Amino acid sequence: MNRSQQLDQVFAALAHPTRRAILSRLAEQDANVNELAEPFDMSLPAISKHLQVLEKAGLITKEKKAQFRPCRLVPEPLEAVSAWTEQYRRIWEARFDAMDDILKEMKDPSHE
Amino acid sequence: MNRSQQLDQVFAALAHPTRRAILSRLAEQDANVNELAEPFDMSLPAISKHLQVLEKAGLITKEKKAQFRPCRLVPEPLEAVSAWTEQYRRIWEARFDAMDDILKEMKDPSHE
């Protein structure tokens, strides 16, 4: 799987509020499927399906040997997403600067 | 549509290499459907479908009145994605720091 295909899977995995909430929960502490299912009022199979999507995208790992079977967040794909957005930073910053200039001009028309 | 639903749509829109390539192209300059279709060797309807997904997610706007009908990048949703990833920054940075310590320890076992 190349880098672009990895990004496809990561973005697709992030396109669901439950999966983003699971990541947010795992950012605090590792948790197993039962613990993750609790706040969502979802069936274990439904949660397991979301976990599979997250695992396939490389966003979590599941410890298979331990009795507790905790899930753990893997932050690297989130850093890849952050790095990907950075190429557009100059565009949104330029847009904000332009808006800022317009607001200044509106407040003080004599402003140069 | 609330903020979470917007993020759903933006992440889903970004989960395709052609749509990411279209955004990259529009980051350089506004372009119409014909210009966007050219480098991808895709049919106009196929490109139009991708543009619809991007437009629905708020990532581009299409000028409907001008004869040229250019598409324009809207950077705000990308900034929202960047801001969303920021909450995980401390996690990936802590992970890299830990890895760094291990590498230093391997190179120089007397290092404290």
Image (spheres, coloured by chain):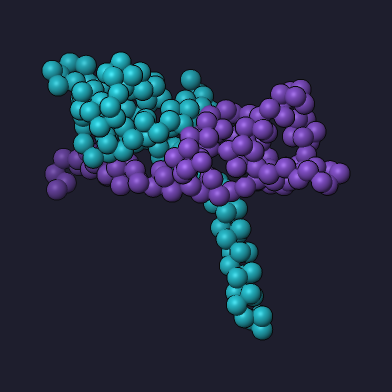
Chain colours: A cyan, B purple
Q: Compared to A109, does B40 lie above or below? A: above
Q: Is residue B72 left or right of residue B97?
A: right
Q: Quadrant of residue A32?
A: top left
Which residue corresponds to the image point at 59% horizontal and 28% vertical from the top-left?
B17
Q: Residue furthest right?
A: B67
Q: Quadrant of residue A80?
A: top left
Q: How many marks?
A: 0
Residue A17 at x, y = what percent? 40, 33
Which residue corresponds to the image point at 29% horizontal and 42% vertical from the top-left?
B91
Q: Compared to B89, does B17 lie above or below? A: above
Can residue A67 be seen in the rendering of this structure? yes
The foreground one among A106 and A5 is A106
Q: Residue furthest bottom?
A: A110
Can residue B41 be seen in the rendering of this structure? no
Which residue corresponds to the image point at 51% horizontal and 41% vertical from the top-left?
B1
Residue B30 at x, y = what percent? 73, 46
Residue A84 at x, y = what percent? 51, 40
Q: Is residue A97 left or right of residue A13?
A: right
Q: Compared to A69, does A73 lie above or below? A: below
The foreground one among B70 and B17 is B70
Which residue corresponds to the image point at 40% horizontal and 37% vertical from the top-left?
A78
Residue B68 at x, y = what percent? 84, 43
Q: Is residue A62 left or right of residue A58?
A: left
Q: Compared to B21, does A93 lie above or below? A: below
